Amino acid sequence: MKDVKPFFVPAPGVVRAGVWQQLVDGQWADIGDFVASWDYATRLDLRCALRIDIDALRVDTDLTDGSPLGLAVGWRCLDTALVGEPVVQDLTADHIEMLMTVPPERAGSEIVLTRRIVLRRDRLSPTAGQAKWAGSILWSDESRLRLTGDGSAFPVEVVAFDEVGRNPNVSWYLQLPASADGPVMGSMLLLINSADVDLVAAVSKAARHTEAQRLLVNQLEEGLVEELVRWALSRWDELESLEDETVGAVARTLAARVIPNPGAWVSGDHSSMDLRAEIAGRARALGFGRQLS
């Protein structure tokens, strides 16, 4: 059902919002539904442009008295419920460009980008149909943005496994903490074996992967999801009371997203293959890992 506000709002077409863009290697590029190669060390620098017929907007909303209006852009994380501080600018020009940064330590697997035109000050004597309170939203839109596209959600380090005591025939190794209450940043590290030159090239590339590279990244992603879910299930009760930004809470959130009823898999009364099939199938359905056509 469409939201019905208790005050006048602008007609369709009065506000024309452009697509969100991300700063990549010093250049602005349009973003779609996900950000490729995002991890917890990647800061998102975003911008958007809007064209607004301010005169028509004021007529439509019956705010021709010069009441101050503003454009606010912000974000919120769907996994952790964290909300970023909005960037607000006075609405004084028909063309306006907004810049916003999403810090990596506060982002999760999916965020919502918001744009809103708001009343910036209370109005003392409004008439029927006019917005009264500061913060009243006259126009808004939202865009969902997945941050687990073609990259891992961890800091990544390429090392020679034979020099650090890891099996030299293994392509990757996810270091997870012994304690689940540590912060996400610094608690997990994805090691890539430098001997696997194909995987190194695939994870090092920010965009325009070849089909072979995309397959390698997807296989890596699926394996990482399985490892994190298994790690969470082995500590399930312990993770319930942890704070949101701990590695345990993040792993529990991921497990709950991938498996609808994680508690049913905690007892161990199932085969390892059944659990692997459950994780892989549902992870792929959510867009993690390789997709079957």
Image: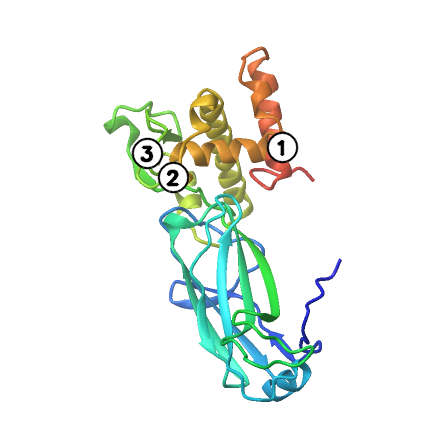
Frontmost of labels 2 and 1 is 1
Residue 34 percent across, percent down from the top left: 54, 53
Q: In the rendered view, would you say 103 is above or below 271?
A: below
Residue 29 percent across, percent down from the top left: 49, 66
Classify the position of the N terminus by image quarter. Answer: bottom right
Q: Which residue in the structure is indicated by mark 1?
A: 282
Tell whether label 1 touches label 2 (CB within 8 Å): no
Q: Amino acid at mark 3?
A: Gly
Q: Earlier in the sequence, mark 3 or mark 2?
A: 3
Q: Secondary structure at mark 2?
A: helix
Residue 284 percent across, percent down from the top left: 61, 36
Residue for point 50% across, 38% down:
216
Residue at far left of view: 163
Q: Which residue in the structure is indicated by mark 3?
A: 182
Q: Secondary structure at mark 3?
A: loop
Q: Earlier in the sequence, mark 2 or mark 1?
A: 2
Residue for point 38% across, 51% down:
104
The reply to whether residue 222 is in sight is: no
Image position of 52 (left or right of 82): right
Tell whether label 2 touches label 3 (CB within 8 Å): no
Frontmost of labels 3 and 2 is 3
**Residue nearest the observer in this picture, 232 or 171:** 232
Image position of 292 (left or right of 27): right
Q: Amino acid at mark 1?
A: Arg
Q: Amino acid at mark 2?
A: Val
Residue at far front of view: 125
